[in-house]
Structure formats: structure tokens, C-alpha cells
Amino acid sequence: MIVQTSLKLIKIPAVILAIGFLVFCLPRIVHADNNDSKFNLTHINRGQFRLSIAIPKGQSPEGGWPVIVLLDGNNTFPIALSFAPKAAIIGIGYPTGNKSVIVAKRYYDLTSKAPESMIPGPRDQPKPKTGGEAEFRRFIFDKALPFIAKKHRIDLQHVTLYGHSLGGYFVLKTLLSDDANKVNNFCASDPSIWWSNHELWQQIKQFDKNSVGPAHLMIDVAEKKVNHQQLSDDEQKRINALRQGPNGRNISEFLRTQKRFDNLFRSYANESHGTLIEFSIADCLNFAFGSNVEPEPNLTR
């Protein structure tokens, strides 16, 4: 059943819009073949979210198709689909193309509650609402995946979760949550460890690995720094100050020294935060499914 939903336009400052929507401002990947022909595609609106579902054609494995769930599905789902993994692809996004609405919803759905002083953007302008990560996690694992499993032959015992930026932060917070045992592979692309004064870093250091079953963690980071042309020098300095400190590399190194999880780390010296996405999706598919895929040669920098 398709559920129609209406979304109000949420007005947020242009600076926050520019920062938050960087994830969607990427060159499009064009592959020689059309992989739509290899999948049965469905797009369903469920409440305030849009589920994009691609099920491989042909006979599924005995337990059903393994699953990759991609956050920011408006952008990440087409990229994953272009690589044609032998897996069910589920993108969770929003039933709108309005940038302002998507950015505001990302800030809420992917984050813990943060003080306004810890949110990027001019101090004298309104900040987006934050703190909806637990609610969003319940939607994914208690509503979306069971709903899809009733309609398609998927294996909920073999689930991979991918997220970039704030989505990567959400992936790592899921690793620390009560829902961690519902995911086998955690793929965090340039995760926003800086969020809310690096609260995640403190939580990781205190985490009891015995509370989670066998898990596999992949972290990719981009090393190339790019300043936002829309920002004043003062605004850029403030954002840089917010984002200083431990990052994805530190998380991976700490977990490795603690012998926590099967832990893969990759660093891309020539990729920026925005351009990393297609590379990290390819890495995640290889990591989870042994897909042996890579971005188009003309996108390699």
C-alpha cells in the first residue's frame, strides 16, 4: 500500500542548507549497462519516509537475499543499484526533492539531541531540530524491514547498514544501541564523530563489546579538505573548530587496539567529504558481499 504524505517546507538558513546538503551535490555515476533490468524495483511511501527497494531477479538464496540498508536513500540508492550487488538494496529517504526539507529531516532523524551551540551555522540564525535517531532506528528495524520482509524474500539475519556523514554517525550509534544485534555489517562513511562535542567518541571508549554479537565494522574517511564558498571566514573557522578532534580514523584505531569487532579502515587522500560517497558504497558492498565492484574509472582521482 502506498501511503501519501504531505511535507511542509521547513525554512532553515542557507549556510546550514549548504553544509547539510553537500551529501547530495555529487557528480552522477553513469554505467554502460542499465542495472534496473537486473532488479525488480519498488518505491513506497511509508509515513514520512520513502522506501526504495531493489530485489535481484532470479532465484534467491535459501534463506532469502542478504540486505543492504542505505541511509539518505534519495542519493545513495541509485549509486548502490548501479553496482548491481547480489543483494536486496533498500534505500531509506524522503518522498520529496526539496533540499530544505531533506536537510532539516536529516538533522533530526540521524542525530542525538545537541545544544544549538554545537550545530553548524551562524549563531544568530535558527537551527534545525535534532535528536530523532532513536525514533528513526525504531522505524527501520521495527517497521520498515518487517514490512519489506512480508513482501519480498529477504534475509533479516544478514543485514548491512550504510550511512555517510551524519548517516555514518548514525551507523556507529546503532553499533552502540540495543538494535546492534540486528545488523551484521556496519559501514560508516566519513562519520560525523564531531557531533555534539564528540559524544560518540566518549561512548565508544566506554562501550562493552560483549553486549554485541559477531559484528563487522568498516570505516572510510576522506582526507581532502574543502572550504564552503558560501561561508564567511568566521563561519568557516567556527565549523572547523566544531569538527576538530577525534575522527573516524581514531575510532577505528581505538577499536582495533581493544580487539573489538572485525574492523576495516580505509583513507582516501584525494577524496573530499562529498566525493567519497560512491567509493565508500563500493567498499561497503565489497566488504559485506564480496561484490568486487569499483566506481567508474573516470571518477577515480
Image (cartoon, grey):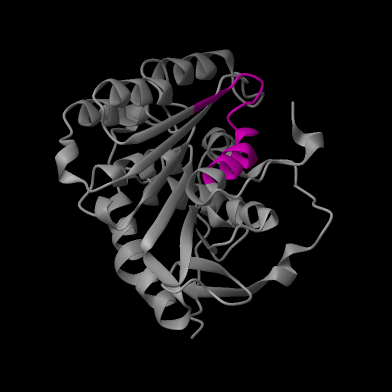
Side (left or right) of 138 relative to 168: left
**Place of residue 240 in the rendered image (x, y in percent of width and height, measured from the top left):** 47, 17
Image label count: 0
- Asked if residue 251 is among those painted magenta in the image, a careful observer would answer no
**Place of residue 83 in the rendered image (x, y in percent of width and height, measured from the top left):** 67, 53
Side (left or right) of 197 relative to 206: right
**Place of residue 183 in the rendered image (x, y in percent of width and height, measured from the top left):** 34, 54
Identity of the residue drawn at 49% across and 71% down: 61
> In the displayed structure, would residue 221 be above or below residue 126?
above
Closer to us: 280 or 25: 280
Outermost bottom residue: 1
Residue 197 visible from this viewpoint: no
- Asked if residue 282 is among those painted magenta in the image, a careful observer would answer yes
Residue 44 visible from this viewpoint: yes
> In the displayed structure, would residue 278 be above or below residue 154?
above
Which of the 4 quarters of the picture holds residue 73? Answer: bottom right
For the C terminus, the quadrant is top right
Q: Which residues are magenta?
A: 266-284
Identity of the residue drawn at 42% across and 15% down: 241
Outermost right residue: 32
**Place of residue 17 in the rendered image (x, y in percent of width and height, measured from the top left):** 56, 40
Closer to us: 232 or 22: 22
Side (left or right) of 192 relative to 257: right
Closer to us: 3 or 214: 214
Which of the 4 quarters of the picture holds residue 247? Answer: top left
Identity of the residue drawn at 52% across and 54% down: 101
